Image (cartoon, helix red, strand yellow):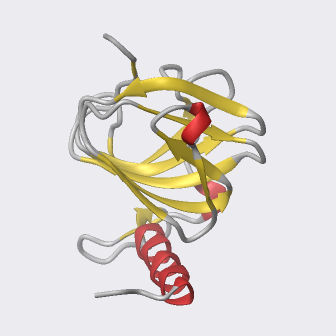
Amino acid sequence: MKISPSGLVVLSAALVAGTLSLARDGKKRSGEVTLAADKLPWEDLAAKGVGVMVADVEGLHAKGAWHGFVKFPVASKSPVHAHSNALRLVVVSGTFRYGSDPDHEQPYGPGSYVFIPANLPHSNSQPDGAVVYVEQPGKYDNKPAGH
């Protein structure tokens, strides 16, 4: 099934809106979680680099399966590295550049989807900064290439 670029943006917006409806504030009905964007629990993502922030929505990125948001500052770059667990991400804002190495990165803007298999070496950079929604079936890590 092919999805048009405008359909992908609508799908991504629905995914993010649905995720935010699964968060943690306000009065809750059984199993309901809500979290307004200005209430995201941002913290440093030390494994990624200076200024990179993570906001876990469910689970804990440092302990196991999780999903949430990662915020990259303007001009941030990650050299070639890999993750022990696959990552699924949707670009919420900014530009997320991704590729096998810095010379082969392609730009992905809001609404774009990127799947990174476990242990696949890659690089990424965010020239204008970026916020991405991430789902990962295991603990987050960041292994430099060759390790």
Q: Which image quadrant: the C terminus?
A: top left
Position of residue 47 relative to residue 37, above or below, is: above
* Left or right, residue 94 beside residue 64: right
Residue 86 percent across, percent down from the top left: 26, 43
Q: Is residue 85 visible?
A: yes
Camera-side residue: 51 or 85? 85
Report the residue that reaches farthest toward the top. 147
Nearer to us in this view, 146 or 84: 146
Q: Is residue 99 above or below residue 51?
A: below
Q: In this orientation, does residue 58 appear?
A: no
Above/below status of 39 relative to 103: below
Which residue is at a point 24% across and 74% down the rendered structure image? 30
Q: Quadrant of residue 18?
A: bottom left
Is residue 124 left or right of 2 when viewed as pictured? right
Q: Is residue 3 left or right of residue 120?
A: right
Left/right of residue 97 with respect to residue 118 in the rendered view? right
| Residue 92: image location, x then y, percent | 59, 63
Residue ID at (55%, 41%): 104
Judging depth in this view, the residue of 95 and 61 nearest the camera is 95
Measuring 42% from the left and 62% from the top, which residue is drawn there? Answer: 23
Viewer-proximal residue among 31 and 137: 137
- Where residue 5 sits, quadrant-wise, is bottom right
Quadrant of the image containing the N terminus? bottom left
Where does residue 43 sit, x and y in percent of width and height?
57, 33
In the current view of this chain or complex, which residue is farthest to the front?
A: 103
138 vs 26: above or below: above
Q: Position of residue 134 (x, y in %)?
A: 41, 52
Q: Residue at x 32, y 72 (%)?
A: 32
